[in-house]
Each structure stands twice: as structure tokens, then as C-alpha cells.
Image (cartoon, grey):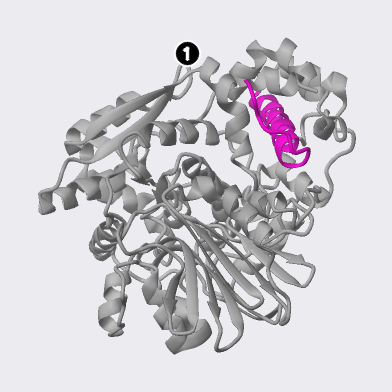
Amino acid sequence: MCGLAGLALRQGLTPDGATLDALTRALAHRGPDGAGHHVVGPVALAHTRLAIIDLVTGDQPLFAGPAALVGNGEVYNYRELREANQLRCTTGSDCEPPLHLWRRDGIGFADRLRGMYAIALADRATRQVVLARDPFGIKPLYTAEVPGGIAFASEPQALIAAGLVQPRVRPAARAELLQLQFTTGAETIFEGISRILPGETVVIADGAVAERRQRQALPEGGPESITGEAALARLDMALEESVALHQRSDVPYGMFLSGGIDSAAVLAMMARLNAKGGTSPVLAFTAGFDVPGAADERAQAAALAQAAGARHVTVAVTEPEVWRHLPEIVAAMDDPAADYAIIPTWFLARRARQEVKVVLSGEGGDELFGGYGRYRAAMKPWWLGGKAPRAHGCFDRVDVLRAAPTGWRDGIGAAEAAAALPGRSRLQAAQALDVADWLPNDLLIKLDRCLMAHGVEGRTPLLDTGIAAAAFRLPDALKVQGHTGKWLLRQWLARHLPAAEPFKPKQGFTVPVGAWIERVGDRLGPLVAAQPGVAEIARPDRVASLFRHAGGEKHRGFAAWHLLFYALWHRRHIEGRRPEGDVFEVLAAR
């Protein structure tokens, strides 16, 4: 996991060294182990390295003939690529095989890669710059049109810090953020900054996009015919292969363990593989909260860890610590996702960094195996009570904003149409919708930014093309039965880690933000209401009232949290104010 940036300008132009230095400084937190540059003609590549694989010879940029490459993430099948394609690599880096594949295969070079990656390569021979992102969008990559060409970086804030883009909010994306807690599609919340989409490979020639190609994360086709036993056997093989690949590392690694199904499955397989290989017990980290009645998964996670023979570390997330660190947590979310799970994820990453540089986690299980309750609603036709996912927004029932958000569902609507391919079931279409936007623009941004803030690499073995091939085309009945989702994964877990009690009612994961906000609502509400970003869109008196009563109805707590998040985000990423102090000191500063 690293940071990359660069410039692809028109012929005859020369990248500015000060701009390249500013990009590198802005991404230093992503790669504290080293930095490198490559400038040739109108093209510049920059890299900051978090050393995980090939600690000795893996510094970047990497070179092969006239081509150079910088990468962020991991190509897990790099050994297999070297052997199967007889590649003559000069380093042990997982990012060198893609460079050789580009020279041989051109734009299709990424089709064989298995992993999480954002790649930028420059080829003097073809006078092209190529940007590529993994199919699930686990690793981020952004572009901006600048005078003379195109700039790119792992984070939008780097493009802003380098003076390449002015920080201006795109109102349509702000409406999405307030209503959905994330933004959709290629355009970010910043005017002039776009995402390379998951699975996209983009070719830039003479400072302009010349070609685009997209690799799909999910297999084509509707539900297949397969028995439960055959599906379990196939799933077991896919899980073992994926987790084994995701454990490839030259540095210590651990995992994030909740009390849920997905991380329990990852734990069970990690424990199996470690027992086979005679390696150390799994190291698992779990967060919990100090609020009575809040969902606290530490006890269940401890029981799972004991059953799997894992070493277990717990992290208590307390209210005073949240208020102390929330400004810097939100500051890490430059591409904003107002998901309250950023709070425990940030604290977990801070603790994990004391012992490891890599953690595995369970993101993707709900999306690939059919876990969300909204999927069960989507499976029904409307006349039987079915409804589209995300049909309602956070502020639909809270009269706080100066004007009701409009057009906030346009991006989701377009993604719905794209997901409803012929032959897919209603369930598959709902899953594909989440894979297209919810995963890369909420869950995976959260994981990337919160972990990279501490120099930790996050890996998601359930988000793997092998797992997708084993899971996505399962019959609906092997995903959802009655009120129970992830049916096949639960069956597998019942056999391999019964202590997980996979068929017990789901507790659900919540962060007690509503209760925390209400306790300090009299003080916090007026501060939030006075922020320029919030004052522009919300009525101050109603904001103050909302914060005083945020701990009651759930939708009020969500709305208050979204406004608090936006106030802190706007202050850092639009106004350019660095977070110095706790949440009250930061919001009170003028």
C-alpha cells in the first residue's frame, strides 16, 4: 500500500518540480518508508512507499526497457504471473510483473492481475501514460484536467495541496453525501476531480485521454444450477486460495475481527492456513464502545478468537477519545464518506500499527453472499412490498436543511439501470449495485483512508475475483433463505468455526454517535450550525435543536452525525484549515 501521483502533459511541456514535490509531500502518510520520482519529457511519476513485499529491491518507480511504473496496493498473484508468463523480473516486487505484461499485451495487461491495485505507468516508446485500477475499486486513483494535460494521484487532497485544483464543492455530490453518506460514479465532490472507476484502464496520449477499457468485478450470467454440497466445496477451495494469497507478506500481519460472519470466516481460514504452515497464531483486533446498550462485539470476538487459537487484542473506543480525535479522523476522509464506522476503524488501525503493517478484514461478504436486509426487500416485486435499495435519504424525515436535496438519487438510479443486466435475478442486480458504488465509495474508502493515516495496509480477501466467481452466480436460495442472508457462508462457518454461531439473529453493527452527540448537543450544535459549510445549507436554529435531541430516534442521530461530519470535512478540505485540537476547539476556532 503506497501513494502515487504524476503528470501527463502535452509534448513539449515539462512537469514542474515544485508541483511534483508538493504531490509527494501530500502523500507521505501513505508511504512512510521511502519516495521516488521519474521524469522524462512531458511525463512525471511520483511514489511514496509502504514496504510490504520485497523490502530490499522493491523501491519504485520500477523500470523495464522504455517503460516505468508506480503502484499502490498488492498484486497477490505476482509469483504465478512470473512463472506462467516466463517474465524476466529483476526484483521480487509484486508490481514488476504488470510492467512486463504491459510491454507484451498493451492495454489488456491488467486482465490477469489478481489483487488490489492502482497503477500508473509511462512508456517512452509509445508516448503513453496508462492508469489502471482493480475491479472492485479497493485502491483509489483520481485524475484532474490541468493546463497542458492531466494530473493524477491516490488522493484528491494531494491534487489540491499541489495547487492543481481549487477546492470547490460540487452541489450534486454534496446532496448525495448528505442523503446517502457517500457519493457515486466517476465525479467526486470536488469540482474538476474525477475517479478512475473500478476496473478501468485509461490510456493518456499527448496530455489527453485516448482510450478507456473496463474490467468487470462480477462474472456474467444469472443464477447457476448447483447443489448446496457442491457449492460448499467450491467455496472452501476459493476461500483457502484467496486467504492464502492475501497472507503473502514480508512484514507482520493481523486481522480485524468483529462478532460477525464475514470476519469470522476470514479468521477460520487464516487459522487453518497458519496451522498448516506452522506459523504464529492469528493476531486479531476488535473495537468496542463505552456506551451502555451499544452493540459491543468484544465478548463474541474474544470467544471466536479463543476457539480459533488466535491472540486477541481489544480496543476501547471512548467518548472523550472520539471528541479528541474526530477532527483528524474526518480529515483523513478527503473523498468523503460519512460512515460512522470510520471511528472504530481509525482507532483499530492506530492500535494495530504498534504490531503489524498489514491487516485482513471482512469487507465484501455482505455484497457477494447476499447479507443485507435491503436485498430481501429488493427480491420482492413492488406489489408484494418490495422496494429499491436506498429509496430514502437521511434528511427525508428531518426538517433542517434550507432546501430539500434534489437529484441526490440520480447516480444511484443510473447504477441501478446498469446493474440490471438481462438474466440477472433481482438479488444479483441489488448486489451488483452495491459493488458498483457502495463498496468502492464508502466501505473501501473508509478502510483505505483510516488505515493509511497510520501507515497500515488493509486487505480484503472476500473481495477477490475467485470468491466472486464462487459466490455471485449462486442460486438465490443459497444466499437468502427467509429472513437470513449469507446462507452458504453461514453453512460453511457452521462446519469450520461453530463457535461463531452463524445462524443466531444478527446483532448489527452500530456506533453510538447519536448518544454521544446528544450528551454534548447544547455545546456542539451551535458550533456546527455556525460553520460556513453547514450555514450555507442548513437553518442554524434547527441544527441546534437536532443536536440536543440526537440520541432518540435513529434518523435524527444519523442526520446530526452527517452534519457534524460535513462541518469538519468542509473546514479541512474546502476552507483548508488543519485540525488542531479536539472537536470543540477546532469548530470554535476562527
User: The C terminus is located in which quarter?
Assistant: top right
Residues packed near mark 1 inside 10 Å, few (<14), some (14 to 19) or many (20 plus) = few
| 95 relative position to 250: left or right | right
Quarter assignment of residue 357: top left
Residue at 59% over, 20% down:
323
Residue at 27% over, 74% down:
80
User: How far from the left and from the top, in percent, is residue 587?
Assistant: 73, 23
Residue at 88% over, 34% down:
536
Foreground: 293 or 473? Answer: 293
| Residue 378 visible, this angle | no
| 382 relative position to 79: left or right | right
| 58 relative position to 106: left or right | left
Give above or below for 63 relative to 217: below
Circle 1: element type: loop
Residue 459 is covered by the magenta coloring: no
Foreground: 553 or 529? Answer: 529
User: How far from the left and from the top, in percent, is residue 566?
Assistant: 72, 35
Q: Amino acid at mark 1?
A: Pro
Residue behind mark 1: 292
Foreground: 576 or 386? Answer: 576
User: The N terminus is located in which quarter?
Assistant: bottom left
Foreground: 321 or 384? Answer: 321
User: How far from the left and from the top, in percent, is residue 445?
Assistant: 55, 49
Please provide the residue range marked out in magenta. 552-581
Residue 564 is covered by the magenta coloring: yes
| Residue 513 visible, this angle | yes
- Looking at this view, name the residue that lies furthest to the front: 17
Quarter assignment of residue 470: bottom left
| 492 relative position to 286: left or right | left
User: How far from the left and from the top, in percent, is residue 191?
Assistant: 79, 55
Q: Main secondary structure of the magenta part?
A: helix
